Image (cartoon, grey):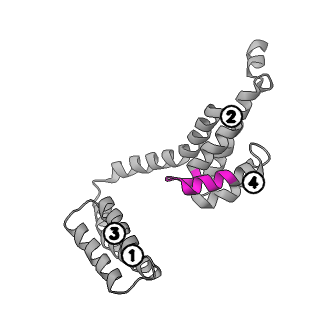
Amino acid sequence: MDNSFHSMLDLRKYPYMNILLQLFWTFLKVNLLSTSGPASVGLLYHETVGKFVTEGEFVQAVGLSSVLPGSDALQLAMYIGYAAGGFPGGMVSLTASILPPTLIILGVTMVLHRLRREAWVANFVEGLAPAISVLMVFTAWKIFEKGGETSWIGWTLGIASLAAMWFKIPERLVIVIAGIVGVIFLSS
């Protein structure tokens, strides 16, 4: 290759591009080495504080991403990327964060698509349904126990919510109404 091509690839001439590449590599690495979400915060702290953001900015980012709806890890990636490289930095960080799980899901989907007509796959899925149902019941019971309200009001609210879902009332509506009723009747 000629020298003009090598000089064009010299990232020292383009410090902004270097930051974007570092952001991409950092968030790709974090999302490949962790399970994401709250588990990745420690690794992200180690990889970004002092390099892209200060410790104070990182603490603010974690606090902000915790109170906003949606994925904490993706919001943290966008915040740090934006702080380091503006809007392009936020987009690069977001892309690097969603790339590994997206590729994994696409790969699994392609494999399952090829195997979907296999009898053992259908039997496997059929066997999973009752196990997942029981798991959901146990999880709901644990949440109900930890909620602290097991008086007649709590039981009535739970049974009414179950009946509403049985009659196919949208789940979001049931949850919102149950929350409002809980605030009105169960607040002390």
Q: Residue furthest left?
A: 167
As shown in the figure, which amino acid type bears the numbered disc 2?
Gly
The residue tagged with tag 4: helix, strand or loop? helix
The residue tagged with tag 1: helix, strand or loop? helix
Foreground tag (1 vs 3): 3
Foreground tag (2 vs 4): 2
The residue tagged with tag 3: helix, strand or loop? helix
Picture residue at 36% right of the left edge, 67% below the top:
180
**Residue 68 appears in the picture as rendered:** yes
Neighbour tally class for label 3: few under 14, some 14-19, many 20 plus, Cα within 10 Å:
some
Indicate which disc, 4 or 3, sits on the residue closer to the N terminus: 4
The image quadrant of residue 131 is bottom left
Q: In this figure, which residue is indicated by the disc labeled 2?
A: 85
The residue tagged with tag 2: helix, strand or loop? helix
Quadrant of the frame with the N terminus: top right
Residue numbers of the magenta segment? 60-73
As shown in the figure, which amino acid type bears the numbered disc 3?
Ala
Separation of residues labelled 3 and 2 (CA atoms):
43 Å
Is residue 99 found left or right of 152 in the rendered image?
right
Foreground tag (3 vs 2): 3
Indicate which disc, 2 or 1, sits on the residue closer to the N terminus: 2
Residue 140 — which label?
A: 1
Foreground tag (4 vs 3): 3
Residue 64 is one of the magenta-drawn residues: yes
Picture residue at 61% right of the left edge, 38% below the top:
90
As shown in the figure, which amino acid type bears the numbered disc 4?
His
Q: In this figure, which residue is indicated by the disc labeled 4?
A: 46
Separation of residues labelled 1 and 3 (CA atoms):
14 Å
Q: In this figure, which residue is indicated by the disc labeled 3?
A: 178
Indicate which disc, 1 or 4, sits on the residue closer to the N terminus: 4
